[in-house]
Image (cartoon, helix red, strand yellow):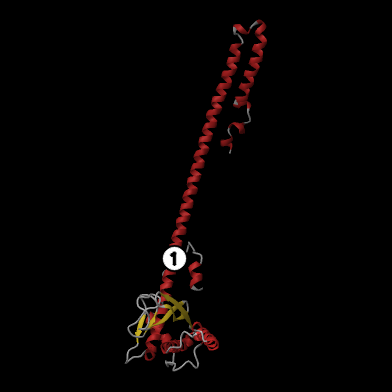
Amino acid sequence: MNHHELWNSPVDLDAEISPPTYEHTVDWIVQTAFARLGPFRAKRDLSEPHRGLRRVLRSEANRAEKFKDRDWSFYKPHFLEPRFQRQLRIFSSIFTILDSIQAVCDVVERETWIQGVGHIHHLVARISIGASSVQLQILEPENPKGNSDLPRGSVTTLRVGSNDKSADFLDEPVAKIERRLDDVIKAILTLAETQMRTTDFLIYERRVERKSQMLAQIAESKRKEQERRLAATKARKEAIKKEIVDAATNLRHAQDIRNLVEAMAGHPDWVGDERQAYLAWSEAALAEADLIDPMRQPIHRCFSAWKG
């Protein structure tokens, strides 16, 4: 499983997530890989360039062909200067050495626009070892000052890496970059292994965080479900209570109506010719009593909340 799959893989909530551990130190890994490499010989020319230079060299050849036909400065190759040719040789040398550990190497052309200068073309090498990617860039004294895309060195400098953990190899009279390839290779291997372990730990932290978040979500879901159940229980109790009170009230009112009908039978205004009016009224009153009397209704209509 690669780092991308690990980063996005499901989290087993029942399993313990342990931090990454390694059988060997970074130095041991680097020395072991270093022993498989070689020979450490710098390329003297680009007659047999490493395949990682193929894209840049093909682009340069296409521009050269167009420049020969039209002689427009727009088509002039970008990397004919000796300093760029040397950069390509150094990259080709490093790539060739790393072939035996199946590193994936490539040189890309980048373009930076600088106000007052125009478009500047420069080279960046990328080396992928396993899940780690290491950038190589050569800083030249000719580079414009103060540009973050194109750093400048007081002397030609090979920079391994692109952050605060990068390693710089200065082109010194007694130790040219081409003569320090063993140190450069060790720096590349060290950075790749360190990056891999850093990524492993980031994945570990992310999985711990995801597990914590998922457990918190589950706990919150359970809390809300408990609240919902308690609220539903409370609402049902209130509904049962209301039904009981309403039934008692209606039973009392129904009996009160019947008592009233019986009492009103003797009212002096409802005798003689008015007796029919009383009978019509009493019929309506008794119908209302029967309508609200819980004893005259199906039990499920009176106590539906309780029956539910």
Quadrant in which the C terminus appears: top right
**Residue 1 screen position, x and y as percent:** 51, 73
* Residue 20 can be seen in this image: no
* Residue tagged 1: 206
Q: Residue at x 43, y 87 (%)?
A: 84
Q: Quadrant of residue 277?
A: top right
Task: Provide residue 268's location: percent of width, then percent of height.
Answer: 60, 6
In the image, residue 215 sits, relative to residue 199, either above or below, namely above
**Residue at x 45%, y 78% (from the top left corner):** 111
Residue 290 lies in quadrant: top right
Residue 63 seen in render: yes
- Identify the secondary structure beneath mark 1: helix
Report the number of discs.
1
Q: Position of residue 213 (x, y in %)?
A: 45, 59
Q: Is residue 256 above or below residue 135?
A: above
Judge by depth and name the residue closer to the eye, 92 or 129: 92
The residue positioned 53% from the left and 89% from the top of the image is 68
The residue type indicated by label 1 comes to Arg
User: Residue 84 vs residue 246: left or right?
Assistant: left
- Tell which of 148 and 223 is nearer to you: 148
Query: 195 left or right of 247?
Result: left
Camera-side residue of 59 and 222: 59
> Where residue 173 sits: x, y (%)?
32, 91
Q: Residues within 10 Å of mark 1 (few under 14, many from 20)?
A: some
